[in-house]
Image: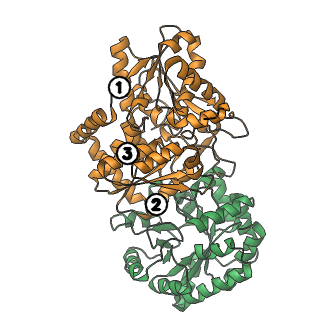
Amino acid sequence: MTRIADRFAELKAQGRSAFVSFVMAGDPDFETSLELVRGLPGAGVDVIELGMPFTDPMADGPAIQMAGQRALAAGMTLSRVLDLVAAFRKEDDRTPIVLMGYYNPIYAMGVPRFLERARAAGVDGLIVVDLPPEEDDELCLPARAAGLDFIRLATPTTDDARLPKVLSNASGFVYYVSITGITGAAAADAARVAPEVARIKARTDLPVCVGFGIKTPESAREIAAAADGAVVGSAIVERLGRGEPPARILEFVRSLADAAHGA
Amino acid sequence: MSAEGVNSYRTGPDERGRFGIYGGRFVSETLMPLILDLEARYEHAKTDPSFWAEMDDLWKHYVGRPSPLYFAERLTEQLGGAKIYMKRDELNHTGAHKINNVLGQIILARRMGKTRIIAETGAGQHGVATATVCAKFGLKCVVYMGATDVERQKPNVFRMKLLGAEVVPVTSGRGTLKDAMNEALRDWVTYVDDTFYCIGTVAGPHPYPAMVRDFQSIIGRETRAQMLEREGRLPDTLVACIGGGSNAMGLFHPFLDEESVRIIGVEAGGHGVDARMEHAASLTGGRPGVLHGNRTYLLQDEDGQILEGHSISAGLDYPGIGPEHAWLHDAGRVEYVAVTDDEALEAFQACCRAEGIIPALEPSHALAHVMKIAPELPKDHLLVMNMCGRGDKDIFTVAEALGAKI
């Protein structure tokens, strides 16, 4: 069992949905980011998605674009992201960490070297936005062979004919993108999400978490009730952009987590 | 498809959209069904005679094709070597080669029932061409343009607005072509139902590099026929400038399997291809990576972060290059060189005075390389450079570079 599988099994036993939070590694700087990430499990976060900053985040809205730019400006690199994970793992060996980002920094490091370092640092899974199943031999299959989960995105444009392909090499959980659009854009609609989650769950035993467009505790509660988990990113990252200290951001995260868990 | 032992350089891409290791479909899942649909619809249109009949009619009566193959006699005399011909794609409607491709994509979009067209633009030529064809067909048009480029290409911004397009200045990144492309992709992922993304160069996810190449190949096919008629044989050397590489691929592709034809692509060397990275020469000064849906040579740092290119020409200022060029580079079939801003400016002025043609800054790069090699070549050597755009849009940039006030 991986940390991700363990965590979802635990939640299932408790009858709770997962709360997944996204923060950009190194935003606004390494130390502040590490402090924030260390506080996430205590604030009720079940799975941590850690952004790997990239200059050209094509699927992200302004909040996460700016977060990446802040991190890069402060000297963040993929190598430092892995350092941050390793530092976190010294104190927490249970909370799953999923790296989320784009392929080029990984390709630049070299896939074998990246996978070896990610494993050693304590990374559990990967979400790479610009690697659809058509490109599985690039990273998905090597990552699975190295024991890392490869979390696949399913979207409103993924129809029934295509869904099996999307699910074929998926592991960990399935990330359902609630809207057609970029991160932090339109509001997710639980009434439209529920049948989509059911459609996916009919074809896989993996948990289905839903993200994109969840900004408030109310929305987190509704979405979490309709799925196995809710993911929030932009709404958290925006607060970092406004200069809020980690302690206050963690209060907000707790309100989201409580709402999602209450569902 | 590997570079070794190929019988033909014209069979790519393979079924995965790859030219060797380059190309591919590196897009988010939301877009994947859209590009698969586009590929299927394009494959169908490609073999449909009525599609090409519509293209041919518009190429002839709307664009003004075929463009002339012009013997640049004075320039040839001044350089004292190879016989220099110019493929005059700057005489096309809208003043550049871009419209060749836009027509194809918009006709396809209409067949797919799409009602909203989006495009990215750098120098504004692709944006103007897209706005033009959208006006002709009554389609809604949104053009993403880096804020920096909006500033340095004001006449084209106004043209697009006159044509009824909405021009969206992009402030993310450094506000140039790559940022405009990011923003266009963000738009597409949002408006998936009614929107067609009209990409301006031979880059992006499969099938764009192949599709844009096919539409631009009219340049090379005409050149071949015109040269055979004029000189009774094929040209010896082809030269074209490369940003993303669509005009070059259009000229080169029909000649790739002609062993006797030397083919040279000219990248933007900016302030010089060196460690300062103040250039836009992806092949000469970059390395393979993945951006905007394809694997190709990119300007990037050690961490895989994309660097902003620099060129005096907004149309060449892109940190990547079409994947087929990357493959032809590795295969050694096409030579790729770089020309600096200053050399391009020299060529720009020489062309104005010697031929009475004001070239765009983009083909001025190709011409600068022609001026380097032509004097060393024999007088019966047939050299074709692609005059892919006219320079009206660039006179302000050139005036500033030359310290002139207008």
Q: Secondary structure at mark 2?
A: helix
Mark sitting earlier along the chain (2/1)? 2
Q: Is residue A62 above or below residue B359?
A: below
Report how far apart the C-alphas of labels 3 and 2 lie in the structure. Answer: 20 Å
Q: Nearer the viewer, residue B227 or A116?
A: B227
Amino acid type, callout 3: Thr
Give the letter of the green chain: A
Q: Amino acid at mark 2?
A: Asp
Residue to which mark 1 is pinned: B222
The chosen color scheme is by chain
Three-letter amino acid code at disc 1? Glu
The residue lying at 28 percent from left, 34 percent from top is B61
Of the image marks 1 and 3, the number of the one nearer the N terminus? 3
Q: Quadrant of residue B188?
A: bottom left
Please identify the residue farthest to the left as the structure is shown: B50
Residue at mark 3? B132
